[in-house]
Image: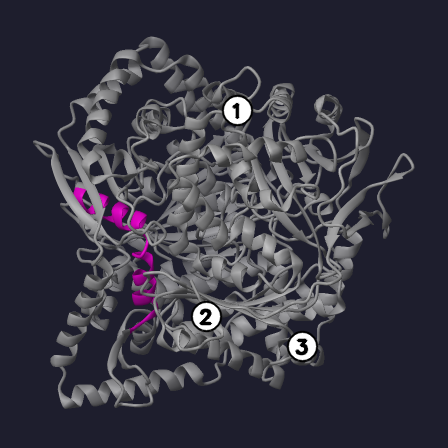
Amino acid sequence: MWRCAGRARRLLWGLSGRDAGLRAWRWRSDTACERALRYHVGEKIHGFTVGQVTSIPELSLTAVKLSHDGTGARYLHLAREDTNNLFSVQFRTTPRDSSGVPHILEHTVLCGSQRYPCRDPFFKMLNRSLSTFMNAFTASDYTLYPFSTQNPKDFRNLLSVYLDAAFFPCLRELDFWQEGWRLEHEDPRDPQTPLVFKGVVFNEMKGAFTDNERIFSQHLQNRLLPDHTYSVVSGGDPLCIPDLTWEQLKQFHATHYHPSNARFLTYGNFPLEQHLEQIHEEALSKFQKIEPSTAVPAQKPWDKPREFQVTCAPDSLAAGSPRQTTVSVSFLLPEITDTSEAFTLSLLSSLLIGGPNSPFYKALIESGLGTDFSPDAGYNGCTREAYFSVGLQGIAEKDVQTVRDIIDRTIGEVIEKGFEDDQIEALLHKIEIQMKHQSTSFGLALASYIASCWNHDGDPVELLQLGSQVAHFRQCLKENPKFLQEKVRRYFKNNQHKLTLSMKPDDKYSEKQTQMETEKLKQKVKSLSVKDKQQIYEKGLELQAQQSEPQDASCLPALKVSDIEPAIPFTELEVALAAGDIPVQYCAQPTNGVVYFRAFSSLNTLPEELRPYVPLFCSVLTKLGCGTLDYREQAQQIELKTGGMTVSAHVLPDGSHLDTYEQGVLFSSFCLDRNLPDMMHLWSEIFNNPCLEEEERFRVLVKMTAQELSNGIPDSGHLYASVRASRTLTPAGDLQETFSGMDQVRLMKRIADTADVRPVLRKLPHIKKHLLNGDGMRCSVNATPQQMSQAGKAVEHFLGSLGRNRKERKPVRPHVVERPVPHGSGGSMHVGGSQIIRKLITDPTFSPCQMKTHFLLPFPVNYVGECVRTAPYAHPDHASLKILAHLMTAKFLHTEIREKGGAYGGGAKLSRGGIFTLYSYRDPRATETLQSFAKAVDWAKSGRFTQQDIDEAKLSVFSAVDAPVAPSDRGLDHILCVPCAHSQGRPLPVCPLCSLSGLDRFLCVPCAHSQRQPLPVCPLPGLDHFLHGLSDEMKQAHREQLFAVHREGLIAVSNKYLGTGRSTHGLALLGPENTKIARDPSWIVR
């Protein structure tokens, strides 16, 4: 997976919290930390020498720095009472051209090694382990290989595979052809068909650069840091990738993948000694120390500012709009290894652009000139020297100079006026609450957080000592009130290393890119001799034969199904009625002084014509002001008193019936316990007195939301295709498309392009009447036992303040099913003699139908989705279908779609609502992929899989089922199960680790099965399973059904649901024109 320049922006946010795996109410003795503190400097352990032992109490960990005696390899162990243990090895990789050599190498080393020579052991281990995360990332100047697991045996197995892959890969030529690039006949079996470029990374990068934000960010880094490795595309420019040779790939590995150029990290509560012994024995003992020449030299500062203009493709959803230009001004900053200065500048960046109270937000966003900040705005600490960028996208070309003038003027105003104390305190409060907020992927967050600084020989331990950095920052402000203003003067006002970059659309851009690729292909083909062409044909057949032949993976280590815990840990819940009849679920957890509140409100009475506007209502509700607070004051209070307040629309398929669902809105927030009354008061004001009349503010928010949705399509096309394909299969499908599909994207673009937004603004109070009251509401609170009494009083007070309808409104749809929420030993949840009732919508007249939709978009790759109506969660067939989806992915679709077809990714998945989805991502094929889907079904129906295959699929399923759940999220599947709280009810735009920045980047981390591709589902455990109203007993029963899945059952469900004419299918495709589809009248082309 390639991390685009600027995609991981901030140094600071998201080092979120303490152990997510604690079972006791109070913190247990930090035994891992205590063990680590017993090491002493100079101690020798399995070929390593301890260099430093440091307690970091603010993160509840102890850091142990070591070095390997024989190779000089650097090692950092972060001991912490967390059961989700992590390993990573990182190499400094500094390419000097855009052939994508580090990226292609990252893919190829995972295709087989000396000890594990089978083809593609990385993907095979996804189905032979209980990993909570497995992946690999190529950044601009390093490559990172991380995994995490809760199982000690699994840790040793994965460590062995990762070490052998990194240090002793096979690097076979055919693997280079498959993963990197190759010339091959369009039909490998027919030498008369034309030669074309193929390859997984080649297609990945073609897809990556359909994203205009990514194009801009890449140019920004290349132009601002032109002297060395940052002037090239580490992931590979599709026009340069075909220049890379197999020999160059092997040479790059020899010079960069050496222990002397490596940095090892382990995290968690497993014993350090075992890690060191295995790493030394299996890898490092076989090497001698060298002096790697991989360092990135300092960028020579400019003596005067520079300007560049680049082009991109027009916005496909804003055809003809004159406001499609982007401009930014960027400044080179000091080296990121100066951790104190980096910390200060990261904070300064947030003060400058973070939220409606920041100077650049006021000056740029509210100017009305553009739609949102330019890509990569803010502090970027992922290169040796950091940089800061600010600008606007969605502007008219004539306004470029105006934006530049505003930026210069704003810098001057900041130097003169500085920042308000409350702005600074709100920012420091964010750091405090994020250090307490508990993440299930804390080790991965740490690895990502320290990677860039450590890569350039900075001190990772110093970087983690956030408490001392905050204290130093406060002291600097105390001693010099103009401390930050002087930084602005030095690094922005008086900085000659300043880049102005503008990007405008070119109607011929895609055509020109295609033409350049065609010319490149012609040059390659023209240089071939007859013998070369024959070899290409033979190599293509050889590769296809290798991809098709059964693989013996017996050399790989594996867990057994018997290693899986037979039972789930039960979650203790209490429920009480508040404000008369509103149920509140209380879940006591070790939340480290943080209180988590959620409320879910039904949409059953909302008129049909208002439904498309619900996501917009949710997006703006907490940003328009409330009560006596205008929107700036509201934003300040939210930052000062909470960790965030989000509102999102949801469609919740029923677990027992395909044609039944619940619709509603989720309100989520969390805060330090001392701020609970203030947080609940904010919710009271938002519910009772929201400001829904501010036209100009509303216009700004609409433009930002529409821009975000439009920019996300290239990275989330498979999700949009899947939502669309399922639209006509269940009653919930149409509403899901309305809330989170392409229909919602197009609606938002239309509203954003409308001169008069008042008609839409007038709809918001009507939605409020149906939503912001106590009718049809239920709540949940997760906190420590000691906080529960205070939390109960605060929630009671909030609920008591809500308005209620004197006359009960009738549901818009007449068919409502009232169903009690299961709880306890198979019974229903009772409170004071009353039952908690869910009001579900059903449609007894619904008849599923097939629909095929092709969204024409100017992409060089496709996103394909095919959905099948199958069985809901509670049905006995659901478990078999779930295992089948993983089986089809690992044993058939991966080979057909990725290895043979060249797509970046593809597979099968089953939703909790019973929709079985086949999908592909960044796929050079379209109709051929649909044929591969049909072949996959035939493969499953014929039962061409072994018991070993079934067991591996079970391991894969259980690694997701048993993923760690943070204390903040436990019990939520009893009351509600939703997509990620940060997705705003929409599909996530891409694998969050490489696309999101700041706080969101660390709160949302890919799951174990991202497989170097974006996720088909939201990755937050506890919030990403559509398990509405499921008790622990019901989940345990489903678990036992998963264990019991057998070969005959898998064949049976394949025939029952997936075969032609068995169940209703839906198809959707996002991508370029397709002549076959255009000639087929059964397709709707939009």
Can residue 76 be seen in the rendering of this structure?
Answer: no
Q: Mark 3 points at which residue?
A: 1050
Of the pair 466 and 980, the residue shown nearer to us: 980
Looking at the image, which residue is at 38% across and 56% down? Answer: 714
Vertical arrangement, residue 243 with respect to residue 547, above or below: above
Query: Disc 2 on helix, strand or loop?
Result: helix
Where does the image place residue 90, in percent across and percent down from the top left?
A: 36, 52
Expressed as whole percent of the image width and height from the top left, the position of residue 581 reads: 82, 32
Mark found first going from the N terminus, 2 or 3: 2
Q: Name the residue under label 2.
A: 121
Given the current orientation, which residue lies at the most extreme right position? 833
Q: Which mark is residue 638?
A: 1
Q: Earlier in the sequence, mark 1 or mark 2?
A: 2
Chief secondary structure of the magenta portion: helix
Disc 1 + disc 3, Cβ < 8 Å: no
Give the CA separation, mark 2 to mark 3.
25 Å
Identify the secondary structure beneath mark 3: helix
Magenta part of the chain: 198-223
